[in-house]
Amino acid sequence: MKAVRKAGDRLAQDIAFSRDITSDEFASVVETFAVANSFRDSHIMPMRSVFYSVRHKLRQFDIRGDMAARPKRMPSIRRKLGSTTVKFDQMNDLGGCRAIMHDIRGVRTLIAEIEEKFPHAIRQRYPYIDRPKPDGYRSHHMVFTFQPGSEDQEVFAGRRVELQIRTRLQHSWATAVEAAGLYRGEDYKHGQGDQDWRRLFELAGAEFSYVEECPIVEGMPDHGARIKELRDLNQKLRATSVLENIKNATHFAETNRLDAGKYFLIRYRKDHTVVVEGYDSIIVATQELGEAEFRIVSGQDDDKVVLVEVGKISKLVQMYPNYFGDVSLFVSNLREICDGRKPVEYSMAKPQVVAVKPREAANLGALYRRYTRWFDKR
């Protein structure tokens, strides 16, 4: 752990790869990232344990929603180490899970069931739904301390894993903030970038709280004033058009390994091209993540990369739409608000059983006429 803390202190500093870097300095940087990646990788198994434990809750209590998991991106780790007093070995979200529920009722139900009984100890809670952040962010965060279930898991005892529980509506807001930031080259997520765009997201977050009957950020104007200000900002920024262009500008390039396994490395490039690589081995996937991040920090590459686990490939875009420029749910609800209607909380209709149509008797005469009309009858 001394090596881990030392690596964390180094990661919090600027790391420059100049032409005159010595071999010893380069080796030191390589060692720093090797230790950091190893420590992050030690959260994978605890993260997957939380992932499957939560998914079991969804099935057990018939809660509609989806799950995803991902190790924390190295740029995010370094930003947090450099801007806060938290130490590398004390970070709560090196392994993170995300549960996206179809509605607020599902969120409340899942939280209650986890608090009632769960295989891992709840260390901390951050109730950003009932106490939303000033920028409009809403999600219920729970930090778990991993509890080993067998002797071979003892080495992972005490690892921290964060779970984010949110609705589709809340998820659409969060991913729209990230997608717009990626597209425009501004970090709205961390309070940077154009003030008007940040204000638009603040107001939209308040309206989403309103429709879900959840607390609204203190100091927000009343409902009518919010609608007017949001409508004016949307017109000024041409926000709906800009957000729709994000989807059109993002090109999704599927690789020939997309059908392999359930671990996916997403690469978002500056030309808005998204490349997805699928893996069936978490060890190989995390190794590739570490190598890709080192190429970025050393200036060999400028991609943004993230490794995620989802149950099905069909859920990948749905769980991480920000990397694919898919902000359609947010845009449609922004239009609803500006037109004076409430945002629509995401929900799916229950499957309907359709009666099987009776099989019709074959018309042999028609079949004969169809295949003999081109032949001369003699």
Image (cartoon, helix red, strand yellow):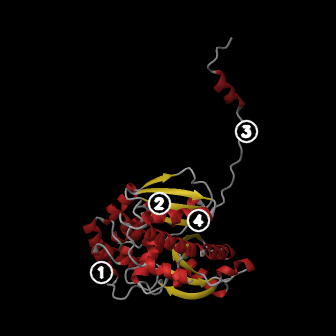
Q: Quadrant of the N terminus?
A: bottom right
Mark 3 or 1, closer to the camera: 1
In this rendering, position of residue 229 left or right of residue 264: left
Residue beneath disc 4? 310
Q: Is residue 318 visible?
A: no
Q: Quadrant of the C terminus?
A: top right
Mark 3 or 2, closer to the camera: 2
Residue 267, which numbered label?
2
Residue 225, which numbered label?
1
The span from disc 4 to disc 2 (Cα, nearest Å) is 16 Å
The span from disc 4 to disc 3 (Cα, nearest Å) is 46 Å
Q: Between residues 48 and 195, which one lies in front from this camera angle?
A: 48
Q: Picture coordinates of residue 353 (x, y %)? A: 66, 60
Mark found first going from the N terminus, 3 or 1: 1
Identity of the residue drawn at 31% across and 66% down:
239
In this rendering, position of residue 374 left or right of residue 90: right
Q: Between residues 35 and 248, which one lies in front from this camera angle?
A: 35
Identity of the residue drawn at 45% across and 81% down:
9
Q: Between residues 265 and 23, which one lies in front from this camera angle?
A: 23
Mark found first going from the N terminus, 4 or 3: 4
Mark 1 or 2, closer to the camera: 2
Mark 4 or 1, closer to the camera: 4
Amino acid beneath label 2: Arg
Mark 4: few/some/many CA within 10 Å (<14, 14-19, 20+): many
Q: Picture coordinates of residue 220 (x, y %)? A: 34, 85
Mark found first going from the N terminus, 1 or 2: 1
Numbered disc 4: secondary structure: strand
Residue beneath disc 3? 361
Identity of the residue drawn at 57% across and 57% down:
278
